[in-house]
Image: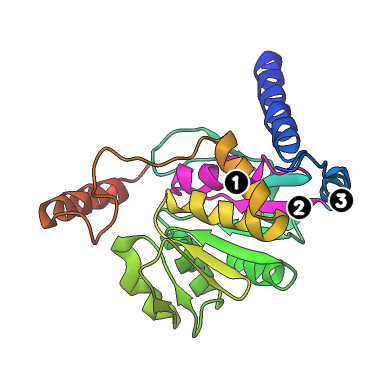
Amino acid sequence: MKSKTRLHTTRRSFLKSASIAATGINLAGHTHADEREEEMNNPLNVVIYLYNRMTVLDAIGPYEVLRCVPGAQVRFAAKKAGLVQPDSGLHMLNAEYAIADITAADILLIPGGDATAQLGDREVLQWIRTLHEKTKWTTSVCTGSLILGAAGLLKGAQATTHWNATNFLKMFGAEPVNKRFVRQGKVITAAGVSAGIDMALSLVALERGEEMAQTVQLLIEYDPQPPFNSGSHSKASQATIEKAKKILREVYSQKR
């Protein structure tokens, strides 16, 4: 266990050090030491909410982006601290904090998945509303936007979500928009699963500038070149859409 922890810590330290080094010299050869020092002295407090039957990449995609930012502290919180069982059924996500332990965040991120239980959980929704009062950015990935909607944060706002859940946004007074991510004031909603990476990179640009965002993008080698052109509802064939819907029904009908 110690060796795994050391490896994780070493990799994280390397990524952060590399991000600092990569932005330390601009094209003209001038250093940005003052800017780096300011970033490190201005920590970014990120909280990612975890819950049973959520989708792993909704949380881990943005995590891999945001943890590379100098000065960022990323914490995982759940209703109760401990292991969370995602919709894949794997026992792999651990929330080190209970939501009662978290009273403030610069960035709050709500992932998606099977969000049904979260929509009616008054304690969770109140926690989201309370943190939202102090956040710089309140964000969601995939059907996490429905949870923001249930918390009353999307009324009259444009928002996006997974293509298969778009119409549900209307239930919460939101205007569905077919975009990779949508910013409305300090609320940013991302479309399905992988769109969380795009949204997280935009957050880095907002907080640390485009140069840092581009550096992080290079660090994680995020250069999408998919082998097929069916990554959105507008591009996929009807047959592909129907197969995808069938898989979703099967996944979320299973009780783990």
Residue 80 visible in image: no
Of mark 1 and mark 3, the one earlier in the sequence is 3
Quadrant the N terminus occupies: top right
Q: Earlier in the sequence, mark 2 or mark 3?
A: 3
Q: Is residue 211 above or below residue 22?
A: below
**Which one is nearer the viewer's eye here, 171 or 66?**
66
CA–CA distance between discs 2 and 3? 12 Å
Per the image, the residue denoted by label 3 is 38
Q: Nearer the viewer, mark 2 or mark 3?
A: 3
Q: Is residue 118 visible?
A: yes
Residue 197 locus on image (x, y percent) = 50, 49
Count neighbours of disc 1 (C-alpha within 10 A) and say few if under 14, some if 14 to 19, many if 20 or more.
some
User: Which-is-in-front pick, marks 1 and 2?
Assistant: 1
The relative height of residue 130 versus residue 8 in the rendered view (above or below) is below
Query: Which residue is nearer to you in this view: 64 or 140?
Result: 64
Check if residue 182 falls in the magenta segment: no
64 above or below 35?
A: above
Was residue 52 drawn as part of the magenta stretch in this picture? yes
| Callout in the foreground (1, 3) | 1
Q: Which residue corresponds to mark 1? A: 214
Q: Residue at x 44, y 83 (%)?
A: 173
Q: CA distance from mark 1 to mark 2?
A: 18 Å
The residue shown at (22%, 57%) is 235
Kindly identify which residue carries mark 2.
44
Q: Secondary structure at mark 1?
A: helix
Q: Which residues are magenta?
A: 43-70
Residue 155 position within the rendered picture, expressed as x and y whole percent measured from the top left: 51, 83
> Which x, y percent locates residue 231?
29, 50
Q: Say whether residue 255 is left or right of residue 59.
A: left
Q: Amino acid at mark 2?
A: Leu
Label located before the other in sequence (1 or 2)? 2
Q: Say what amino acid the circle numbered 3 marks.
A: Glu
